[in-house]
Image (tube, coloured by chain):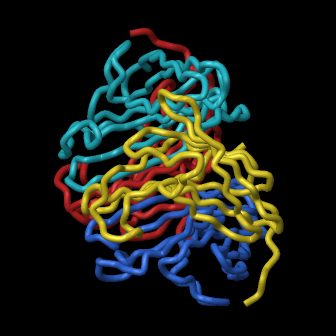
Chain colours: A cyan, B red, C blue, D yellow
């Protein structure tokens, strides 16, 4: 397999206005647990250091959460897994802003398994 | 928990061309009621005053609906909850335009529970 | 109810690369028939005349389909309903390009009722 | 049927940060097999040669996959069908970058049939 060079792609500031992790799940195993994901793509040749801030309805923002997306890698980060500085509350509206030191692409996805039938949503985040 | 400073993010004019609140729901409780939401994020340090106009297929626009998104907060606004100047009719096609005095980000989501299995859609609105 | 003035919003060229009308439905009535919709918003004060071209995998494009979105109105146009110059084939991949003489906003939605549980997708189209 | 001329539409660099082909399906036949699709639209008058690179969490990128979207055609390409230089692993996070020599539009869709009820997601890719 060849290792192709990729052009720089993306932006350094992204926002996801929708955020909500359902507290319930009906599936078994991690794949079917209700979750929200920010899919981060770093197609460049330098590691991207990303600082994430969470916004809420009625309290001050929390952050920064710090993640690194290595060069030429994608990181599908579950908000469910964030721990530092604080876990993300369930059944609570939130939003998120991503600031990266390298261009990245951010896409938002939710898998909702509160009912036995899965529901999915996805959208490219707002980048500027 | 620290209170990080966030860069200004977003635009002041947004549009959602899709709008439809299903008249029926099968779930119990507010979480599972069929609804359409505009998720508004104000990552800046000044309150954002937003004026919303609704457009219809065969009558003049209705508005403005006025909402405030406080500084450093997100507001997940259900169209179902709008009351003034008029509630949003169910089972009716509509669209919406948001004009804000501060930069915000707008994302559109529908939870449809007409059937027992949830269906979800979401997209970042059109910003300019 | 007041009749607010809205700023011009949108673009005059839009594209939807995804298109697929399922041939089957399980629901009863027009609301639950599997369908694809282009939601068109004309927030301006002049009627928008829109010419739509459909693209396929293995034949020449078909069009233009002509629709008018009146000033200050939204039109949620089902591809299922297009008749002239030709109906849209079911169970067939297609794409669409919209050219308008006034700025509009275009959002794409599919309701899929091939199974008893609804599935939904939506995204703002690509505008330029 | 007429053959309308279409204006050039799209961009030459696109990215999809989300990628995941479920390993399981419950439906019968190709239409209901869990799949991820990149819908490519070439509305122009010259064939578009597209080079696709796949990115992963913990290994080097794979590619280029080469596809041609003929002039005035759409290609709804299933990632499931990619074979050269290597098939796309199932149940694995990935992302993708598309580089085209002609303007195209890229939209991303997943049909998930792991449960008996379909789930759908779709978003226009990130173009620059």
**Residue B75 placement: quadrant:** top left
Given the current orientation, which residue lies at the most extreme top position? B2
Left or right, B89 with reference to C116: right
The answer to whether C51 is drawn above or below residue A75 in the figure is below
Left or right, C79 with reference to C67: left
- Residue C30 percent across, percent down from the top left: 38, 81
Q: Does residue A19 show up?
A: yes
- Residue A9 percent across, percent down from the top left: 68, 35
Residue situated in front as seen by the camera: C81 or D73: D73
**Residue D7 placement: quadrant:** bottom right
- Residue A22 percent across, percent down from the top left: 27, 39
Quadrant into which the N terminus of chain A falls: top right
Left or right, B106 with reference to D40: left
- Residue B72 percent across, percent down from the top left: 49, 24
Q: Does residue B68 show up?
A: no
Residue at the location (44% across, 44% down)?
D89
Quadrant into which the C terminus of chain A falls: top right
**Residue A89 placement: quadrant:** top left
The answer to whether B13 is drawn above or below residue A71 in the figure is below
Residue at the location (53% across, 68% down)?
B56
Left or right, C99 with reference to B11: right
Residue at the location (59% across, 52% down)?
D124
Residue at the location (56% across, 30% down)?
D60
The answer to whether D100 is drawn above or below residue C112 in the figure is above
* Mark count: 0
Residue situated in front as seen by the camera: C17 or D64: D64
């Amino acid at each position: 397999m060849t290792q192709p060079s990729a052009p720089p792609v993306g932006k350094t500031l992204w926002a996801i206005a929708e955020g909500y992790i359902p507290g319930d799940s009906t599936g078994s195993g991690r794949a079917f647990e209700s979750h929200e994901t920010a899919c981060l793509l770093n197609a460049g040749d330098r590691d991207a250091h990303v600082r994430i801030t969470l916004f809420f309805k009625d309290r001050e923002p929390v952050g920064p959460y710090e993640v690194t997306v290595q060069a030429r890698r994608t990181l599908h980060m579950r908000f469910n897994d964030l721990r530092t500085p604080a876990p993300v509350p369930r059944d609570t509206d939130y939003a998120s802003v991503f600031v990266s030191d390298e261009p990245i692409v951010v896409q938002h996805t939710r898998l909702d398994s509160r009912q036995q039938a899965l529901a999915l949503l996805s959208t490219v985040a707002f980048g500027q």
